[in-house]
Image: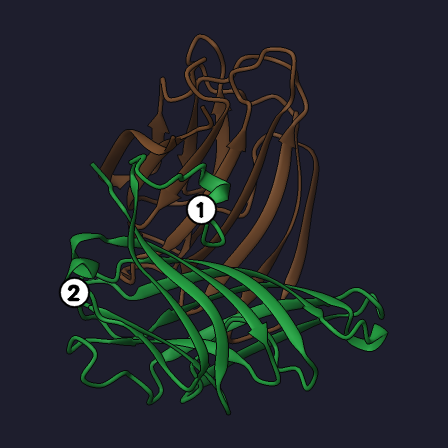
Chain colours: A brown, B green
Amino acid sequence: MGLEIIKKVSSTGVSSLSVSDIFSSTYDDYLIQQTVYDNASANNDGTMRLLDSGGSEINAAEYYYAGEDTRTYNSFTESTGVAQTSFAGFGYQDASTTTGVGLTMYVFKPYDSSLFTKCLWQGQVGGSGQARWYAGSHKSAETITGLKFDTGSGTINIDCIVYGIKGT
Amino acid sequence: MPLGAARFGLISGVSGSLELIQTQTFSNQSTINFTSSSIVDFDVHFFTFNHTLGGNTPALRVSSDGGSSYLNNNEYDWNYRLMNRRTAATNEYRSTGTYFLPLQRSQAYQWSLGSNVWIYNMNNANKYTHFTIQSTGADTTDNIAHYAKTFFGNGFVEDKAVHNALQLLPNTGTLTGTASLYGLKQS
């Protein structure tokens, strides 16, 4: 019982990171972490999409979310998305910054083809005090097998660690 | 079972990627230090805190010398959202400076608090140590003015160094409760 590591991936100088074949019938729920989101070639504001049963990126307008961008240096900003083509509120980094980040996301029952996939994520994501806490649902009942982070602008050094939450 | 252990299905004697480093139970104590040598065996840590008697703001500090001293001068950068059940008000707080990272807002009543904290990059000398926090608290006297509050917080330590000890402390007075520190394996 507990958390069991499934996969750790990292890459440098990339505009996106696909993390494929991580969800399966072995686990219901997952914990995903990111500790590196550095050396951006430009200021950026990251997004995330899910991968379908064949490993293809889902870019349909099926992402719904609500959250808040919090920051030390300025007022907070609420953020909502209805029928978007990705989840917002992931990595954020100023250009050429190497602070590291800390982000944890819970993904609930992504492999169950009868349910929407739900996610909760919270992170201190870099950029001198930029942080987020969000929840979202992929409004299409289908089997999800992975996910893909995108910087939105420029390249980044990035990592991702996936754990299965083992109940029994 | 420490707060948070149930969340991940941890039962004594059953292992996983989340490993208990230390649990401390304390009463009327001004500082609670976690200085285990195994802290540096992990890059990511999970910290849980159950506070049973309030009147102050519990917070965290880190050390880069094994707990001989704890950083306390302009290294902490944090922001958090606090939601109040009775008033439905939400407040945002943010600060840099000498204040340490809070786990919840100060309360002048008997205050029961549960917190969980993810701590990232403590063992990486090239990155800042980052925190994400979720807490909930309740007034144990059922005072409706402070009945329940929810807290989402984030922050980082503006100090690129290996941080090998963690300190839990209140802004004033003492703490009573239980706290546990876990390490999360990445391979």
Q: Are marks 2 and 1 on the same chain?
A: yes
Residue at horizontal 68%, vertical 86%? B108
Amino acid beneath label 1: Ala
Query: Which of the pair B130/A48 is nearer the observer?
Result: B130
Residue at horizontal 42%, vertical 74%? B26
Q: Earlier in the sequence, mark 2 or mark 1?
A: 1
Residue A46 visible in the shown view: no
Specify the subunit that label 1 lies on.
B
Taking the image as shown, residue A63 lies to the left or right of residue B17, namely right
Residue tagged 1:
B5
Location of the C terminus of chain A by quadrant is: top left
- Rendered image quadrant of residue A126: bottom left
Image spot of residue B111 (x, y percent)? 65, 75
Image spot of residue A82 (x, y percent)? 72, 36
Residue tagged 2:
B125
In the displayed structure, A134 sits above or below B110; it is: above
